[in-house]
Image (cartoon, rainbow, N blue to C red):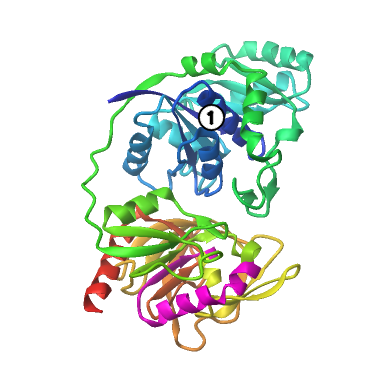
């Protein structure tokens, strides 16, 4: 058992500044010498990378729609154990999630599920007394959500801050924790798939010190020591995890600037069930690691590194040979694009990829798909026997050009649903023992990790 202080940083809406506040608080707490464990609500691959840079500990995802309450509680406890403070960054607005009819997938759901006090970040531009009315609505909408207080962001002056504090006197149970001044120089830049990755191209404005700049900004209006001590402490008990299996297969996982979208829990579950994970870079490495049984190509930004990927013909040839050998490959979104014939965009041109799937990925200016997805397999596969259920998320700007199943060598494996029910989309494409999809699955939503390892182990033995 360990005593850890916990909080969830939520926003009134996307763009209110909750990520900047979360990163600034994580860094401020770290500068006090505290062990800070970051978490992120929702299907986000980028914010956890920023969290790790700010806090010095790997960030982990929590999700109330993709994962069960027990899964979320176990992930939270497993990683919060031993930390002085656990900071959970919310997703979108406090009550936004899977649909407009329920709190599934929302920050509010996670706050209730894990008994986390909420610090509400409010963009106070052009508001004074109205800010209190706004906060009152968020507090009253779900009485079962506990609020630790409010942080006003983009406050224009000392007089503006005074007006906001006066207005909040009408809500004595919701303390004002701070009034943060406008400071556009330290904002994190956006790009077409959200925030920039914290490493490589697109380092946030201000370079590596942006996290210290955010901490300085926080500390200009908030005493992090007082704030930390005001957050309720709780007992954290480690989950009773099964003993990991001895490695049975060697799994090559593509991980570099082009392929960087992985849930850490997916990798943990693969190791739990007997995968020895070996990272490699399709951008920089000339050869695949030795003696691999299975490949996992995650999502990311292959379109930004398409020239380098195309130039690395030796790696592309080896991945195609791996496919032709019958050993399994699992690819999601960006990894799936890499296995197509080409990646094409108006501003960058056409670049040759691996050519396993007989289509090309064409980049668009607007996203082609966005939202949670429920997947059911319609045949036996490396994910398990027919009827495997799993949950995930889809968000991409590219679209397939061509009929991927036209020549008979590729079949569609998934039936998928979104918040409105079954979708007409053709998804989950299998060519031999290679499975590619635009859907990012969370392996904690089903038995995918165990099945993938078992499938690769059977092929290893039979081969």
Residue at x 47%, y 71% (from the top left corner)? 287
Viewer can see residue 222: yes
Q: Give x and y (percent) for residue 87.
A: 48, 30
Q: Nearer the viewer, residue 257 or 143?
A: 257
**Above or below for 253 versus 244:** below
Find numbered disc 1 in the image and state the secondary structure of the residue it sits on: helix
Residue at x 53%, y 57% (from the top left corner)? 256
In the image: residue 47, left or right of residue 346? left
**Above or below for 445 versus 76:** below
Q: Give x and y (percent) for residue 227.
A: 53, 17
Residue at x 57%, y 32% (from the top left corner)? 22
In the image: residue 213, left or right of residue 433? right
Q: Quadrant of residue 223?
A: top right
* Majority secondary structure in the magenta region: helix
Q: Give x and y (percent) for residue 104.
A: 46, 43
Per the image, the residue denoted by label 1 is 26
Residues rendered magenta in the picture: 306-334
Q: Nearer the viewer, residue 92 or 75?
A: 75
Q: Is residue 325 magenta?
A: yes
Q: Is residue 70 magenta?
A: no
Q: Nearer the viewer, residue 77 or 293?
A: 293
Viewer can see residue 12: no
Q: Quadrant of residue 136?
A: top right
Quarter of the picture containing the N terminus is: top left
Residue at x 76%, y 67% (from the top left corner)? 347
Q: Give x and y (percent) for residue 36.
A: 46, 29
Q: Nearer the viewer, residue 409 or 38?
A: 38
Residue projecting furthest to the bottom: 407
Quarter of the picture containing the C terminus is: bottom left
């Amino acid at each position: 058992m360990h005593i850890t202080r916990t909080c969830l940083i939520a926003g009134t809406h996307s763009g209110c500044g909750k990520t900047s506040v979360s990163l600034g608080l994580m860094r401020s707490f770290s500068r006090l010498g505290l062990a800070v464990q970051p978490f992120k609500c929702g299907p986000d691959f980028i914010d956890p990378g920023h969290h790790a840079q700010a806090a010095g500990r790997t960030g982990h995802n929590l999700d109330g729609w993709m994962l069960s309450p027990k899964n979320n509680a176990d992930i939270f406890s497993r990683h919060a154990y031993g930390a002085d403070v656990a900071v959970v960054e919310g997703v979108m607005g406090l009550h936004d999630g899977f649909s407009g009819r329920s709190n599934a997938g929302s920050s509010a759901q996670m706050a209730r599920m894990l008994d986390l006090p909420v610090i509400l970040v409010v963009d106070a531009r052009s508001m004074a007394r109205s800010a209190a009315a706004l906060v009152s609505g968020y507090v009253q909408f779900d009485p079962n959500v506990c609020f630790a207080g409010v942080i006003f962001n983009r406050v224009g002056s000392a007089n503006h801050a005074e007006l906001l504090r006066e207005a909040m006197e009408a809500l004595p149970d919701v303390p004002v924790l701070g009034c943060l001044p406008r400071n556009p120089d330290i904002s994190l830049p956006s790009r077409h798939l959200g925030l920039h990755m914290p490493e490589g191209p697109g380092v946030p404005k201000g370079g590596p010190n942006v996290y210290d700049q955010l901490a300085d900004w926080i500390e200009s209006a908030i005493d992090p020591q007082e704030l930390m001590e005001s957050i309720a402490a709780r007992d954290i008990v480690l989950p009773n995890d099964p003993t990991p299996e001895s490695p049975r297969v060697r799994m090559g996982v593509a991980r570099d600037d082009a392929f960087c979208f992985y849930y850490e829990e997916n990798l943990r579950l693969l190791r739990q069930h007997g995968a020895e994970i070996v990272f490699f870079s399709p951008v920089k490495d000339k050869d695949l690691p030795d003696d691999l049984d299975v490949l996992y190509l995650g999502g990311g930004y292959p379109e930004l590194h398409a020239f380098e990927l195309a130039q690395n013909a030796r790696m592309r040839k080896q991945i195609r040979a791996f496919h032709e050998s019958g050993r399994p490959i699992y690819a999601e979104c960006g990894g799936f694009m890499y296995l197509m014939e080409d990646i094409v965009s108006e501003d960058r041109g056409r670049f040759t990829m691996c050519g396993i799937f007989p289509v090309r990925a064409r980049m668009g200016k607007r996203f082609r798909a966005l939202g949670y997805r429920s997947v059911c397999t319609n045949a036996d596969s490396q994910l398990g026997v027919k009827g495997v259920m799993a949950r995930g998320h889809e968000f991409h700007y590219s679209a397939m050009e061509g009929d991927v199943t036209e020549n008979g060598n590729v079949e569609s494996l998934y039936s998928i649903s979104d918040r409105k029910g079954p979708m007409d989309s053709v998804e989950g494409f299998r060519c031999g023992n290679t499975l590619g999809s635009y859907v990012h699955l969370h392996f904690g939503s089903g038995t995918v990790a165990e099945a993938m390892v078992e499938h690769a182990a059977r092929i290893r033995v039979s081969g």
